[in-house]
Image: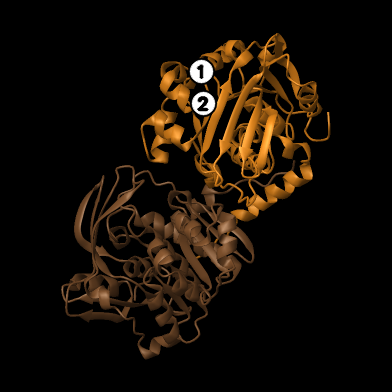
Chain colours: A brown, B orange
Amino acid sequence: MSESHSRTGGSLLVVGSVGLDTVETRAGKRTDVLGGAASYFSVAASFLSAARMIGVVGTDFPDAHAAFLQSRGIDLGGLERVAGRTFRWSGVYAPDFSTRTTLDTQLNVFQDFRPKLPPAWAASDYVFLANIDPVLQLGVLEQAGRPKFVACDTMNFWISGKRPELLRLLERVDLLMLNDEEARQLSGEANLPAAARAIRAMGPAAVIIKRGDAGALLFHGAGVFAAPAFPIEEVVDPTGAGDSFAGGFMGWLAHEDDASPATIRTAMILGSVLASFSVEDFSLDRFRRLDLTQIRQRFTAFADLVHFEKIRI
Amino acid sequence: MSESHSRTGGSLLVVGSVGLDTVETRAGKRTDVLGGAASYFSVAASFLSAARMIGVVGTDFPDAHAAFLQSRGIDLGGLERVAGRTFRWSGVYAPDFSTRTTLDTQLNVFQDFRPKLPPAWAASDYVFLANIDPVLQLGVLEQAGRPKFVACDTMNFWISGKRPELLRLLERVDLLMLNDEEARQLSGEANLPAAARAIRAMGPAAVIIKRGDAGALLFHGAGVFAAPAFPIEEVVDPTGAGDSFAGGFMGWLAHEDDASPATIRTAMILGSVLASFSVEDFSLDRFRRLDLTQIRQRFTAFADLVHFEKIRI
């Protein structure tokens, strides 16, 4: 392993998609580049904690991608390689990044994905269930023993299409991360604090509502925390920003082996740091030239971004 | 004057609308209640600094409203009362507050408003030009001597309809406050940091981009500052939130008689504090039962909202 994460701390497990993305933005186009929630998550986390990855790829998955993930200390012991083609997604972003249009989704080998935990991984401490069918997310939890902290993501497709299964999952997770529109859809509340209150009543003690370039809000028993987004003037590719946020967030909890309120706040900033780097290049390319010094510098920049003097009136 | 603001500090001048609003939200409806940018601004500021108000009302303007403004220490020596009806605005907000629809605007005596500064006010230190015709905003500056700090607001109507006049104004102000859509419209840039850069090149050394419940961003020579919005679960009436923000902001600069980068950051938080109270009731009613203790408590809550531990990775 590199110097880039601690060997101590808790163990970190992620289950999610690994795929090949074709992306077009105002900054250019990339074809069949490394993508998928588990990829972004685990590489972002790798600067803080080595992740165990559960996923599936086809026989066409380039060895170079697997080698890159391993070079980041990621344990691919749960990444199945099966006959067929790797999951593919293709999309184009509006020039102002306000919308993105999916041009093509090929589930391929992901269609029949049934996550299987290597027996030794059942004792994982920190578990992130990236955005996949809640039935599969539940299946992971059934194999996962008693993690110290479970977080999950979801999306509009599951909120409307598999609501009962999603609600069963939410009873068993500590934290749900989702974006503002998903929070409104899941809760039926337009007001975000009200939406968070309703979602917390469904099970998760904590909810993180992601708002893109407006940052993220954490609602939990210790109150509310607002993490800004770092103002980035030259966004290249927003794909995977949310999963990079999750990776930085969970990576810090595992690094600290702690999920106390203070650690969770710092984790949100590290999530925002990793997300801010992620969008500066296509695919995971910014992470290929990222180091801890740059992460520390941006963490300091985040502290400065929100710093103000405490005054007496 | 009450105990609610310092007698020292710099002098504060505001020019803008004073009107009677009819507002309907999910929380109810109010008819012909006190409104207008200069009203919200000066009452919000009054907890920090007494403002001098330049505006116009008709003979129908209730004495009770003038008495309320004066009870807040606001100097109405520049508030003309002329024959005719007071400016009126009527609007309805969507149940989720995502949009508002203007039902009626009656300029009335505001139609022929030509701001006139009492001679003694030409020496005002801190000047806020609320959202009115940029020709009138320029007219105030021509009467205003050499203020220490001039801030202005504007809107889409002037950005498209009186762009040359607005650009002449911007060469003469220190700070422009506007919302994100207005910033995009004025600059032609979708990305907010890029928009701020373009606007600063038009003249103002500082730009504050207001994003409603996503907070506000300050761009100036000392970098970027992100002020969160306070998460409010029970919004009653968002009317005047931006002007209340401006009042808290400019009120603090005048209170401190300083516009250094550190003071400007704190002013943004006090602006956010006053804005957060403003939306908790119709019209300016929340300010009628607000005191410095509540302001201090919410300021502390803002500090907690963004606090995180500085860590070593």
Tell me the chain of label 1: B
Image quarter where the N terminus of chain A lies is bottom left
Amino acid bearing label 2: Thr
Rendered position, B161 above or below A174: above
Circle 1: is it few (<14), some (14-19), or many (20+) Cα within 10 Å?
many
Amino acid bearing label 1: Pro
Q: Residue furthest right?
A: B2
Q: Nearer the viewer, residue B112 or A279?
A: B112
Rendered position, A258 above or below B287: below
Residue B187: where, in percent of width, then height?
Answer: 39, 30
User: Upstream in the sequence, badge 2 or badge 1?
Assistant: 1
Side of B290 relative to A144 (left or right): right
> Mark 1 = which residue?
B134
Q: Can the viewer see residue A16?
A: yes
Q: Can the viewer see residue B309?
A: no
> Mark 2 = which residue?
B154
* Element marked by disc 1: helix
Residue A34: where, in percent of width, then height?
Answer: 25, 64
Quadrant of residue B25 within the rendered picture: top right
Side of A254 relative to A288 (left or right): right
Quadrant of residue A85 within the rendered picture: bottom left
Rendered position, A10 above or below A118: above
Q: Are marks 2 and 1 in contact (CB under 8 Å)?
A: yes
Image quarter where the C terminus of chain A lies is top right
Q: Nearer the viewer, residue B278 or A159?
A: A159
Residue A203: where, in percent of width, then height?
Answer: 56, 72
Tell me the chain of label 2: B
Rendered position, A22 above or below B145: below
Q: Do marks 2 and 1 share a chain?
A: yes
Residue A45: where, in percent of width, then height?
Answer: 40, 68
Side of A112 relative to B179 (left or right): left
